[in-house]
Image (cartoon, rainbow, N blue to C red):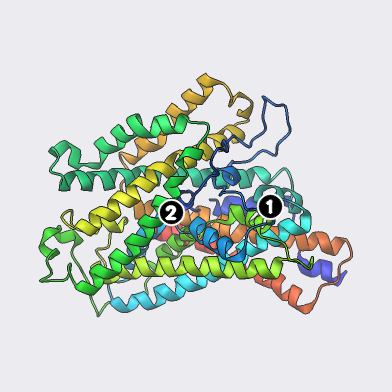
């Protein structure tokens, strides 16, 4: 009995209230995707065609599925690599602006890197936590684990949070596509009209994104994942190289080639900590989103030959994957901020000169990866909206498929014609969606699962009781960070 009282006596209503208070993250997590060749991507929202009963929820598990592991399961090295790939996306391109929101003092990078490591560690813990709860309740997905641990009725909130993540991703993708192609057109000497982002957003939407988003089998786009990985790796090396060679410092060969508002602005007298820290925290929440795939990574990891639990091995995989992701985040964040200081833009590549050949290569690589990632995210967005509106039974109809694609693309790509600050989009999305998906939902799932065990008569160890306290603190932290992140971003 004491253990039961210690756990808490939450109710599904409390879970709903907490979710609504902090609501929604994870902006650019879906650009880290690969698909098994030949495997069509179908809505996982309940098929009216087959009549089968499928749990209603977004298709993220399908949209982010990597090539199937061998029959014996995936090895630790390959799973670490796949997890790191799944975590690191184009959201890292905004992190330098997050540090710039804190201070223009180079020393501000120290607390920024500490936060990068700390939040990466917390995100790794909650990623593992979701898999643990999934194993306990016998659920193969984030959505189903919530339903079994908390309540089926409140599962719609999980679907909504993940669907809104795809909405924010669609907006961010359109912004990046417009900025990248406009910069490339400027270097190519294109007419003035084509050196602005909006014409490229419109042209790309009509001629490329719309046809690709109509595809029902997206396996042909799997190579976009390779382009994305190569582009991110090249960008990390490029930003550090330009920092080292001083090309953008006063007197450097590209210093006068960029607008004054983009030139380095560093002030050693600035305080290294300010309220802008919450903006960076929100962005870092976005950078580590992969949590909807936690149960899948656990299931695909090869089982131990002696039949023992593979959770210890899984935790090593999680540590490795999130560690590599933190290294990428810190590298690009450091290179961008130490080069441009408080003038680092929301999309750091916009700081670099259009005449810089290496910057051009980065823009081409990132732009191409986003174009191929857009339809994969869009399928998840469209299916998630169908599920939330209870329209998934019409998803197989051609007119509904085409009409919904046009309507949703006009809504989000149209919004990108007005909204240009990628950093703001990522900060607000991270504050809301990231706090929910990365911190609040996993903590609630764990607490409700421990309550279920307590009701079944389980006796908890001192370590388990401490973990319950830690998750209560995590719940409070996630809610507070969500509220403060939105307030600071909009201030």
Cα–Cα span, label 1 and label 2 = 41 Å
Label 1: how many Cα within 10 Å (few below 14, some 14–19, many 20+): few
Residue 1 falls in image quadrant: bottom right
Q: Position of residue 45 (x, y in %)?
A: 64, 35
Query: Is 271 drawn above or below residue 427 in the view shown?
Result: below
**272 left or right, relative to 318:** left
Residue identifier under label 2: 428
Would residue 124 be found to the left or right of residue 412 on screen? right
Identify residue for label 1: 71
Determine whether 148 is above or below 48 in the image. Answer: below
Question: Percent from the top left, x then y, of residue 108?
Answer: 34, 76
Q: Position of residue 287 (x, y in %)?
A: 46, 60
Front tag of 1 and 2: 1
**Observer-nearest residue: 313 or 203?**
313
Looking at the image, residue 390 sits to the left or right of residue 112; the answer is right
Q: Are marks 1 and 2 in contact (CB under 8 Å)?
A: no
In percent of the image, x 20 and y 56: which residue is there? 357
- Quadrant hosting residue 388: top right
The residue lying at 54 percent from left, 47 percent from top is: 64
What residue do we see at 35% from left, 75% from top? 109
Position of residue 218 relative to residue 424, above or below, is: above
Q: Of helix, strand and loop, which one carries label 1?
A: loop
Q: For the residue labelled by badge 2, is the local secondary structure a helix, a strand or a loop?
A: helix
């Amino acid at each position: 009995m004491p253990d039961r009282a210690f756990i808490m006596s939450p109710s599904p209503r409390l879970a709903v209230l907490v979710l609504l208070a902090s609501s929604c993250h994870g902006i650019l997590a879906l650009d880290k995707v690969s698909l098994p060749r030949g495997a069509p991507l179908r809505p996982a929202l309940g098929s009216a065609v087959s009549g089968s009963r499928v749990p209603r929820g977004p298709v993220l598990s399908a949209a982010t599925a990597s090539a199937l592991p061998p029959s014996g399961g995936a090895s630790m090295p390959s799973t670490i690599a796949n997890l790191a790939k799944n975590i690191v996306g184009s959201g890292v391109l905004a992190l330098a602006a997050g540090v710039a929101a804190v201070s223009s003092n180079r020393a501000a990078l120290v607390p920024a890197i500490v936060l990068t490591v700390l939040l990466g560690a917390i995100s790794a813990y909650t990623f593992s936590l979701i898999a643990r709860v999934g194993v306990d309740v016998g659920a193969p997905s984030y959505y189903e684990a919530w339903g079994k641990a908390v309540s089926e009725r409140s599962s719609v909130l999980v679907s909504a949070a993940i669907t809104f993540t795809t909405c924010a991703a669609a907006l961010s993708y359109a912004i990046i596509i417009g900025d990248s192609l406009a910069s490339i057109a400027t270097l190519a000497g294109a007419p003035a009209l084509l050196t602005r982002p909006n014409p490229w957003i419109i042209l790309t939407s009509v001629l490329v994104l719309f046809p690709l988003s109509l595809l029902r089998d997206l396996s042909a786009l799997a190579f976009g994942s390779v382009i994305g990985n190569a582009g991110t790796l090249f960008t990390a090396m490029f930003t550090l190289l330009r920092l080292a060679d001083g090309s953008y410092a006063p007197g450097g060969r590209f210093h006068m080639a960029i607008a004054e508002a983009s030139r380095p602005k560093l002030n050693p007298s600035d305080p290294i900590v300010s309220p802008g820290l919450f903006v960076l925290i929100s962005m870092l929440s976005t950078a580590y989103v992969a949590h909807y795939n936690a149960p899948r990574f656990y299931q695909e990891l090869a089982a131990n030959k002696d039949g023992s639990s593979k959770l210890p091995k899984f935790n090593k995989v999680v540590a490795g994957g999130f560690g590599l992701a933190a290294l990428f985040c810190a590298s690009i964040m450091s290179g961008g901020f130490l080069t441009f200081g408080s003038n680092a833009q929301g999309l750091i590549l916009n700081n670099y000169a259009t005449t810089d050949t290496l910057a051009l290569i980065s823009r081409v690589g990132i732009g191409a990866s986003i174009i191929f990632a857009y339809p994969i995210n869009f399928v998840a967005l469209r299916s998630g909206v169908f599920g939330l509106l209870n329209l998934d039974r019409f998803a197989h109809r051609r007119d509904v498929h085409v009409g919904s694609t046009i309507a949703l693309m006009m809504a989000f790509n149209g919004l990108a014609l007005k909204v240009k600050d990628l950093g703001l989009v990522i900060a607000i999305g991270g504050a809301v969606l990231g706090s929910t998906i990365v911190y609040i939902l996993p903590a609630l799932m764990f607490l409700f699962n421990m309550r279920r065990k307590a009701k079944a008569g389980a006796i908890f160890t001192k370590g388990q009781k401490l973990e319950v306290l830690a998750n209560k603190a995590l719940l409070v932290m996630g809610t507070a960070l969500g509220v403060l992140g939105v307030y600071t971003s909009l201030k």
